[in-house]
Amino acid sequence: MSHLQAYKNDLYELRFSPMCKPAAEVANLTQLESHTTRARMMMLWRIAEGLIEWTPREVALVYESTLDSISEAFDVFHYPVSQYMLAARADIWEAGLAPECVRQAVEASLTADFGAPDTSETLLLAGEIAQLGDDTLLEPMKASAQTCGIEASAWVVATGALAYTLGAWDVASAQAKQIIAGIQASGAEIVIADGPETAWALTKIYPGLGLSLPEGVSVKLLSVALDERYDNQTGPIPENGPVLFHDSRPACLLAEEMANHLAIMPGYLEDEAAFGVGAVFEAPRRLLDALPAQRVFGTWTRSLARTSGADDGLWMTYPHLAAGLAAQRLDYADNLGAETIITDSPLAASYLSKHTSGHSVGVKLLAEFFEGKKQ
């Protein structure tokens, strides 16, 4: 049985659902009905039922988007749309039908030799940094950790998250085993993830692949670790202009609760917690409030945050679509009156920063903003 067939009943229920149309990110960009969540769920059901077969166009429709976790967050029943997308991609990969751009992205994650981690009680695992291929943002991350009394040895290494999201579960499993062996060899008891995608890999992807971290090892997102350790006893710090905190799409998959029924009601902006609950959302916001920062937010926040374009490998596979999504996110921040987008995702920070031309809003990694406020 294919991976997708395991979800045949769910897909049957979703065939005619109008859910998620406002959240259909790529469809909002291209204005193509085939990019809507509902159209793609219908397509996946027909494939799972054996009514149609994979053609290059059907394959492309599975990859011309993120994993659609925003759609499962927007749906009041939270159907696991991202799991359907993952299953479809795994079937495509195993059948040898993955587009060339997808194969190239997976191969790129295998080319770098990242070496082994140093011996350390606390390991800063920089998986998002590794995907970027640029460790510029690693320095403020290490500095912010040290400011909060966290001594961590950094290991820049591919986690397997990219391969997993693109359906190459065999590659992801091999990379995960390398990570687990490296953590074991380092003697680390605490692994700090550089961003939500890395934390998602360690805590969700690996168990899904039947793999476990060494016994006794705990995982924390860097923003959570900073929030726990930051002691704001140095006196008042002047406020900056309005900032919008951007949650990357993997953060949704780390949430304790996704958006509730209030959040999807038009115009509802009373309680930000209605848009998602969990340390992945609360910790960076508490840290910003403590610095302090003047935060603004709108409908597309927390589990409903629209993508930066850098999520789920889209910036590598279909860069023209990713660039359009980045522009939409920057436009949204401009419309909210934000002067700066702050994010705890190195992938999102780097990618959005490359697309700010024509926008008044700037972009900073949370660790950069934190260090700037402390100076």
Image (cartoon, helix red, strand yellow):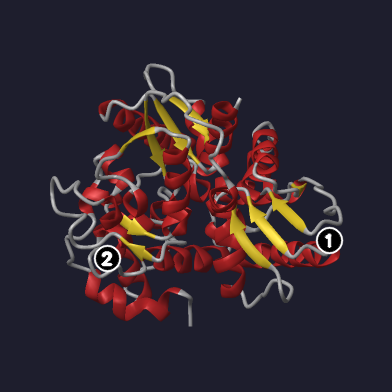
Counting from the top left corner in percent of width and height, residue 354 is at 51, 25
> Gap between marks 2 and 1, in whole Å?
47 Å
Crowd band around label 1 with a 10 angstrom C-alpha radius: few (<14), some (14–19), many (20+): some
- Front in this rendered view, residue 19 or 259: 259
Tell me the quarter of the picture where residue 39 sits: bottom left
Regarding mark 1 in the picture, which secondary structure is present there?
helix
Locate residue 316 relative to residue 49 in the image: left or right. right
Q: Residue reaching furthest bottom?
A: 1
Locate residue 70 relative to residue 165 in the image: left or right. left
- Front in this rendered view, residue 252 or 93: 252
Please state which amino acid type lies under the numbered disc 1.
Ser
Where does label 1 land, which residue? 186
Q: Number of labelled discs?
A: 2
Regarding mark 2 in the picture, which secondary structure is present there?
helix
Where does label 2 land, which residue? 42
Counting from the top left corner in percent of width and height, residue 278 is at 41, 60
* Residue found at x 74% / y 65%: 189
Counting from the top left corner in percent of width and height, residue 202 is at 62, 63
Mark toward the viewer: 2 or 1:
1
Locate residue 319 relative to residue 231 in the image: left or right. left
Tell me the quarter of the picture where residue 327 sits: top left
* Residue found at x 53% / y 66%: 90
Q: Is residue 187 visible?
A: yes
* Residue found at x 70% / y 62%: 190
* Residue found at x 74% / y 62%: 179
Rendered position, 209 above or below 335: below
> Could you tell which of marks 2 and 1 lies nearer the N-terminus?
2
Counting from the top left corner in percent of width and height, residue 122 is at 75, 56
Crowd band around label 2 with a 10 angstrom C-alpha radius: few (<14), some (14–19), many (20+): some
